[in-house]
Amino acid sequence: MPENVHLVTLRPFVDDKGNMGLNIIFRGRSFDDGHLFVKTLETSPIFSNVTLAFEETRDSQAVQGEVEMALSAYYVPGQDKGGAE
């Protein structure tokens, strides 16, 4: 997890084929921070089909330049450290 990124919501889902996944909304201090988190999930063996749903730059004085993004990704069981195939 990049240092300048924090999760806003994390919701599990099961699709019509029984595959498990996560819908994630997160914020980063910058566009680059947000995309680093997306790239981290894309290259992780425990997630597949990482799909970015939206990205929005927030420019209020309190959060100038902050970006909020939403994505979905499927969990791949057995690919985590110590997991059985």
Image (cartoon, grey):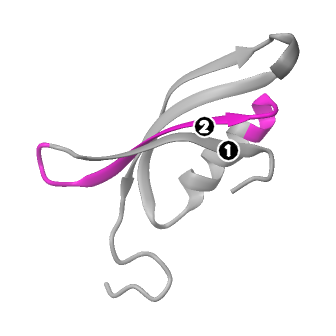
Q: Residue at x 77, y 29 (%)?
A: 31
**Distance between the alpha carbons at the discs numbered 2 and 1:** 6 Å
Work out whether residue 84 or residue 2 is closer to the camera in this orientation and state it. 2
Work out whether residue 61 or residue 79 is closer to the camera in this orientation and state it. 61
* Residue kind at label 2, given as amino acid type: Phe
Work out whether residue 41 or residue 63 is closer to the camera in this orientation and state it. 63
Q: Residue at x 39, y 85 (%)?
A: 83
Q: Is residue 15 rendered to the left or right of residue 56?
A: left
Q: Residue at x 33, y 51 (%)?
A: 21
Q: Earlier in the sequence, mark 2 or mark 1?
A: 1
Q: Is residue 13 rendered to the left or right of residue 29?
A: left
In the image, residue 21 sits, relative to residue 71, either above or below, namely below
Q: Residue at x 58, y 58 (%)?
A: 43
* Residue 25 drawn at (x, y percent): 53, 35
Disc 2 secondary structure class: strand
Disc 1 secondary structure class: strand
Tell me the crowding category of disc 2: few under 14, some 14 to 19, or many 20 or more residues within 10 angstroms, Cα based.
Answer: some
* Residue kind at label 1, given as amino acid type: His
| Residue range highlighted in magenta | 16-33
Label disc, if present, on residue 6 of the rendered structure: 1
